[in-house]
Image (tube, helix red, strand yellow):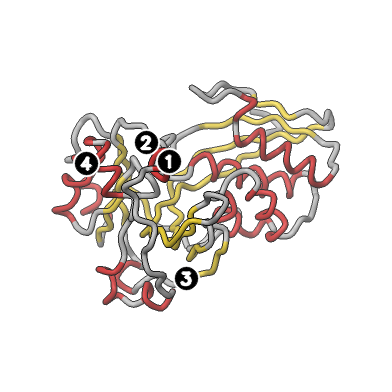
Amino acid sequence: MQDFQTFLAPAKINLFLHITGRRADGYHTLQSVFQLLDFYDTIHLKATNTGQIKRLNTLKNVPESQDLCVRAAQALQLATGCKQGVEIRIEKHIPMGGGLGGGSSDAATILLALNHLWQLNLSRTQLMQIGLTLGADVPVFIFGQTAWAEGIGEVLSPVNLPESQKNSYYVVLTPDEHVSTAQIFANLRLTRDTKPLRIADFSSSGNSSKFRNDLETIVCEDFPAVATTLNWLKPYGEARMSGSGASVFVAVNSKQVADEVLANKPANIRGFVAKGLAKHPHYNLI
């Protein structure tokens, strides 16, 4: 693809997810840790002088008008008055609708890349503000490092992983199940009163029992394939669901072990092995 430049959009997992309350506007307040992974969608971009935003390939069940990549480019144009355009090709590898942040990550990579290609010179904070208009998870990918999240997920701070997790490999499995995030958050059985914890609580290896995914029980009750996949992983370690599912993961201490777990997975479940990223691959574009 001549004249196209290639950019990466990493997956994420939530190492835990606590729902701490609900605001008057209906948004839920939470605490979570976002860990970026070295498993990527690939985005090819060619800046143009036409002012037009064009997606050149089709994506199943994602019309161009609803594609977060297209919307991110349009939002950046609107925010800056930029008259340049872009042609976009997207290679999807991150499972869609699996709680791994693929769409949000793609949008964030578009913002990072076009800020560079269009020479807009916006700050990280400015790009995160634009990203938040596209979705609550977009800013964390622009923040670009392991992040402690509060508020509705937009208040971000760097966080150190417990020593026991710093060299982990993650086995991530995604059953063939579509979980509606809105449906889970609206569920009347969801408790919304988990006591807030501190970053120091998370960074201490001795506190892992305090952390969980508050959405996991409801998702497993309503989507048996998620429960089955999670139960399959549990003999290998402290398995957990990411976001609102359907993806689940477990951390192990070597790539060899991770590859063996993946090789034994049930045939009807997609999966991959990944290492955590300290920084987004395009962190230094800003």
Contact between labelled residues 2 and 4, with CB atoms less than 8 Å apart: no
How many other residues sit within 10 Å of disc 4, few (<14), some (14-19) or many (≥20)?
A: many
Contact between labelled residues 2 and 1, with CB atoms less than 8 Å apart: yes
Give the residue at mark 3.
Answer: 159
Residue 79 x %, y %: 79, 46
> Between marks 4 and 2, how big is the CA–CA gap?
14 Å
Q: For the residues carrying marks 1 and 4, which lies nearer the camera in this image?
A: 1
First-in-chain label (3 vs 4): 3
Q: Work out whether residue 28 or residue 122 is closer to the camera in this orientation and state it.
A: 28
Among the 4 quarters of the image, the one containing residue 255: bottom left
First-in-chain label (4 vs 2): 2
Give the residue at mark 1.
Answer: 181
Give the residue at mark 2.
Answer: 179
Q: Residue type at mark 2: give it.
A: Val
Q: Secondary structure at mark 4?
A: helix
First-in-chain label (3 vs 1): 3
> Between marks 3 and 4, how big is the CA–CA gap?
29 Å
First-in-chain label (1 vs 4): 1
Give the residue at mark 4.
Answer: 229
Q: Work out whether residue 116 or residue 123 is closer to the camera in this orientation and state it.
A: 123
Q: Secondary structure at mark 1?
A: helix
**Is the C terminus in the top left, top right, bottom left or bottom right quadrant?**
bottom right
> Between marks 3 and 1, how big is the CA–CA gap?
25 Å
Rendered image: mark on residue 67: none
